[in-house]
Amino acid sequence: MNVHEYQAKAILKEYGVPVPKGHAAFTPEEAFAVAKELGGPIAVVKAQIHAGGRGKGSFKEPEAGEKGGVRIAKSFDDVRTFADEMLGRTLVTVQTGPEGRVVKRLLIEEGAAIKRELYLSFLVDRATSRVAVIASTEGGMDIEEVAHDAPEKILTFSIDPASGYSQFHGRKVAFELGLEGDQVKQCVKLIGSLYKAFVEKDMSQLEINPLIVTEKGDLVCLDAKLNFDSNALYRHPEIVALRDLEEEDPAEVLASRYDLSYVKLDGSIGCLVNGAGLAMATMDIIKLYGSEPANFLDVGGGATKEKVTEAFKIILSDPNVKGILVNIFGGIMRCDIIAEGIIAAAREMSLKVPLVVRLEGTNVELGKEIIRNSGLAVIPADNLADAAEKIVAEVKKAA
């Protein structure tokens, strides 16, 4: 789960992390009022969407101007003008895709006198089951570019959860970033605060880009991107309350209400599978046979008829879907339940695309009998390879 920048900074501020003063604004008048409260003389107007590259992005609407989603205002009137130009407009960045995101809120914050820009992030290293720290002197840039062009400028190390954070971790980062004097002490405190926030809030990503050194020699987190482990959100109702459903794909939001694991992709073959590993294998074999999956969808091991029906509806809501492959291995999940859900959804939505079904496991014969007696044009498959070959052939035939 992602949050907006202003929400991320509010969370970090609770842990004593230095961030610029600022507040969210939803109208040009609110933006003007926040700027007046901050006092100037410089204010920064930042579009709030769940995507990076906002400063280098561009708006679809010409009336929004050509200055991107992060703008420097030198007067209170500039703040109101920029807010009026940005709110309600569609911002396109390298991470949004060509469709872009509509800007519905802004962050208005005080300006900063920047001397240096640095990079800092915390991630979950699944290979070592530890929190990994990444730091670089090349702040303000995409870390992927730095890793490609100058990997020697990136420091990466992990923190042992058994011993936790120690001051030497902070000093290691400080020396790598070329900090001196009191900045080293600030860095030691900052890394400790960020690590504590990362662990206590069950984050999966914490990125500060850039972490700046001001002209006065202070460290400030000028930007902040937080991502939280969805599996741990039950422990953090205060984080769940920050969720902006308008920034998420409507189909993925609907899927979450039914406890379905769904991710929309760019292909043409919809997949309904039980089990994440089986879902990945299904997507791979669709590609192997010459097509592309339209989604990842795991109905889980304890799905009901209603849950399967909703999963089917979500797949069919994607206009790019030209065929559907159902691949079920029934253990806890019974094949007859899957079959009933498929039939109910297909009838309700007047299925018009090819449907290939492969069932194995608990009550498989009953499931196959339900499908045979449904009167629907369902194509049975004997195994996964057979299923993938058939659905790819059907989609290509219909194209």
Image: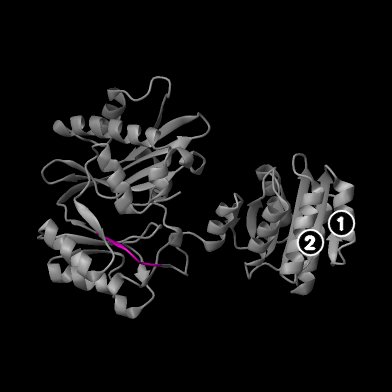
* Position of residue 56 measured from the top left corner of the image (x, y, whole percent): 33, 63
Residues shaded magenta? 102-107
- Tags 1 and 2 touching, CB below 8 Å: yes
- The answer to which of 297 and 155 lies nearer the viewer is 297
Residue where numbered disc 1 is placed: 370
Judge the density around disc 1: few (<14), some (14-19), many (≥20) Cα neighbours within 10 Å.
some
Which of the marked residues, 1 or 2, is nearer the chain's N terminus? 2
Q: Amino acid at mark 1?
A: Ile
SS class, disc 2: helix
Examine the rendering and report whether any part of residue 95 can be seen.
no
Query: In this figure, which residue is indicated by the disc labeled 2?
Result: 343
Residue at 33% in and 60% down: 48
Please state the horizontal and vertical placement of residue 120, each as a whole percent of the image.
33, 41
Q: Quadrant of residue 270?
A: bottom right
Instruction: Point out residue 9 in the picture as x, y percentages from the top left corner.
Output: 28, 47
Q: Residue furthest bottom?
A: 63
Q: State the separation of the CA atoms marked 1 and 2.
A: 8 Å
Q: Is residue 317 left or right of residue 12?
A: right
Where 84 falls versus 14 (above or below)? below
Going by the image, does 32 lie left or right of 367?
left
